[in-house]
Image (tube, rainbow, N blue to C red):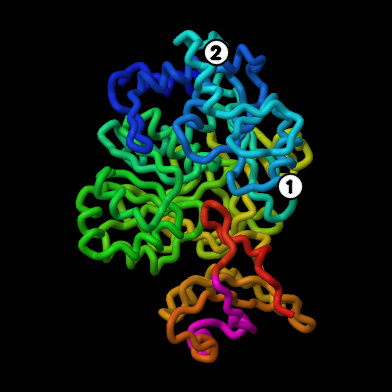
């Protein structure tokens, strides 16, 4: 079985039902099926075959969805490129993935064939409504997702049909997603959050989805109240923006919503509490990666514990190991290692990196976490973010959470600064709010934090550098003199 067999639960089983809305237009599942069939035959006519790569550099659109489904039907490996990337980053992916062509609306310097999505759609209208006959099993690669590359050039994580399928089936079961849901998707489809979770949950469940090109906080309340979704996936920065919606509108939105999910970056416990007070809903936080899709999730039924990412999803084994690859005790920090049907096939044409990424069959995530006695996992940050000061381990997220709770600070990030005596010391980058006073904040830190965790400097900045999914890019923070 491959993804097509699961998609057919909706493409064929619900073909007359409205599937997708975008900018005032609507398409049924049958129309999505027919359009992607024609597009798959056109790609085949243009010389693409199973195993070839097709790079796609597009903003959210129905054309991007149809291209993905067409690639799945044809066995072509879909390679989405972050729409915020520019020449250097795009060139790296085009060189590394070695695609047959690039689909984009933008001007990109490349010797590859470049196809405009509107032109492909026009050409595809002349093709038959017939699915190409391709023999694919679940181990066939479906996509290559490039990592954010914060510690070097980005690597392509190869995800199979089985990886995407196992992830989606888990989420449908654990988050109770059904054809009765109305799904508002504003996440970018170039990322596993939008593509791996959003698109696959929609297609397999057969729910009705409204796709947005991007999240716009100015019109968010109007969009929610007009479409009246029951399901929404977001990142922490989106939920911070939703806290600005007036209380009466927030209560109205909460009255028809069923589930808010957050991921792609840590959700501050204070944001979760403020959101619950305003909307009457507890956000469900979960933990995933480009290489593994979703791993751990707070439960749909049961406690959604602030600050934690919950419990391992079905079929996924989690180990917390120290530097010697030994298990750590409950409450102690260790690196997260994962094994399961969600874990990727390896890095594209990087056998060395793939070998380094696995230990005894478990994927080494680079994320640091603790596990509670009752099995909830709490992320402490990245292994690369760890600050070692005078022999003490400092996990920045603990300090960041405390700083974010202060009303005079909108958001904060903590990073290492070299120190002659202690090796490293923590430095805080803060976006100040009204009444901010560094001396007052430092005094509060001294009351609540161990002395070695107190930031040695508080640096005010206008905003934290983030990627398209809202994850703070600490390597872009300007180091203090």
Q: Secondary structure at mark 1?
A: helix
Circle 1: is it few (<14), some (14-19), or many (20+) Cα within 10 Å?
Answer: few
Whether residues under marks 1 and 2 lie with C-beta atoms below 8 angstroms apart, the answer is no
From the top left corner, tell me how far across and down residue 392 is, in percent. Answer: 66, 75
41 left or right of 304 in image? right
Give the side of residue 436 with respect to residue 457, left or right: left
Q: Whole-Å distance between the Cαs marked 1 and 2?
A: 32 Å
The magenta span reads: 443-462
Image position of 212 with respect to 429: above or below: above
Magenta span contains residue 459: yes
- In the picture, the disc for residue 41 is 2
Return the x and y of residue 119 as percentages of the image width and height. 55, 24
Res. 9 in view: no
Q: Residue at position x 74%, y 48% from top?
A: 153
Q: Residue at the spot x=43%, y=75% of the render? A: 405
The image quarter containing residue 180 is: top left
Q: Where does the C terminus fall, quadrant-wise?
A: bottom right
Residue 465 x/y as whole percent: 59, 63
* N-term-proximal mark, 1 vs 2: 2
Identify the residue at horizontal 45%, vertical 31% (top origin): 62
Secondary structure at badge 2 equals helix
Q: Pointer 1: what residue?
A: 88
Q: Residues within 10 Å of mark 2 (few under 14, many from 20)?
A: many
The answer to whether any part of residue 73 appears in the image is yes
Q: How many marks?
A: 2
Is 108 on the left or on the right of 285, as rendered? right
Relative to the observer, which residue lies in front, 310 or 178? 178
Q: Is residue 99 above or below residue 372?
A: above
Assess whether residue 346 is covered by the magenta stretch.
no
Percent x, y of residue 65: 48, 30
């Amino acid at each position: 079985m491959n993804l097509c067999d699961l998609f057919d639960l909706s493409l064929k089983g619900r073909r007359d039902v409205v599937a997708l809305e975008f900018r005032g237009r609507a398409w049924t599942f049958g129309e999505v099926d027919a359009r992607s069939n024609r597009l798959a035959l056109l790609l085949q006519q243009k010389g693409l075959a199973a195993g070839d790569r097709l790079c796609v550099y597009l903003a959210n659109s129905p054309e991007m969805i149809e291209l993905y489904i067409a690639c799945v039907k044809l066995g072509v490996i879909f390679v989405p490129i972050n729409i915020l990337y520019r020449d250097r980053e795009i060139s790296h992916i085009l060189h590394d993935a070695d695609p047959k062509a690039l689909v984009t609306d933008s001007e990109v310097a490349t010797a590859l064939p470049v196809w405009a999505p509107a032109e492909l759609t026009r050409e595809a209208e002349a093709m038959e409504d017939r699915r190409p006959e391709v023999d694919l099993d679940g181990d066939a690669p479906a996509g290559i997702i490039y990592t954010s590359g914060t510690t070097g050039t980005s690597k392509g994580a190869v995800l199979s049909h089985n990886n995407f399928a196992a992830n989606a089936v888990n989420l449908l079961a654990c988050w109770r997603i059904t054809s009765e849901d109305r799904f508002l998707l504003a996440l970018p489809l170039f990322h596993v959050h939008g593509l791996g979770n959003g698109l696959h949950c929609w297609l397999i469940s057969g729910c009705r989805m409204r796709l947005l090109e991007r999240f716009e906080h100015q019109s968010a309340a109007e969009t929610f109240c007009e479409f009246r979704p029951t399901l929404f996936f977001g990142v922490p920065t989106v939920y911070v923006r939703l806290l600005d919606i007036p209380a009466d509108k927030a209560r109205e939105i909460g009255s028809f919503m069923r589930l808010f999910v957050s991921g792609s970056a840590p959700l501050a416990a204070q944001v979760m509490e403020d959101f619950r007070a305003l909307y009457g809903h507890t956000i469900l936080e979960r933990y995933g990666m480009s290489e593994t899709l979703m791993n751990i999730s707070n439960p749909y039924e049961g406690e959604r514990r602030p600050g934690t990412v919950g419990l391992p999803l079905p079929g996924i084994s989690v180990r917390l190991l120290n530097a010697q690859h030994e298990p750590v005790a409950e409450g102690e920090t260790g690196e997260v290692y994962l094994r399961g049907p969600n874990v990727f096939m390896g890095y594209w044409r990087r056998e060395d990196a793939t070998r380094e990424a696995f230990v005894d069959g478990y994927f080494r995530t680079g994320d640091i976490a603790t596990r509670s006695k009752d099995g909830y996992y709490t992320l402490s940050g990245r292994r690369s973010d760890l600050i070692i000061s005078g022999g003490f381990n400092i996990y920045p997220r603990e300090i960041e959470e405390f700083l974010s709770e202060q009303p005079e600070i909108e958001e904060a990030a903590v990073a290492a600064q070299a120190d002659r005596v202690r090796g490293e010391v923590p430095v805080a980058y803060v976006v100040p709010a009204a009444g901010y006073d560094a001396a007052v904040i430092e005094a509060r830190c001294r009351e609540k934090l161990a002395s070695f965790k107190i930031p040695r400097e508080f640096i005010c900045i206008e905003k934290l550098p983030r990627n398209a999914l809202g994850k703070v890019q600490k390597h872009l923070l300007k180091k203090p003199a």
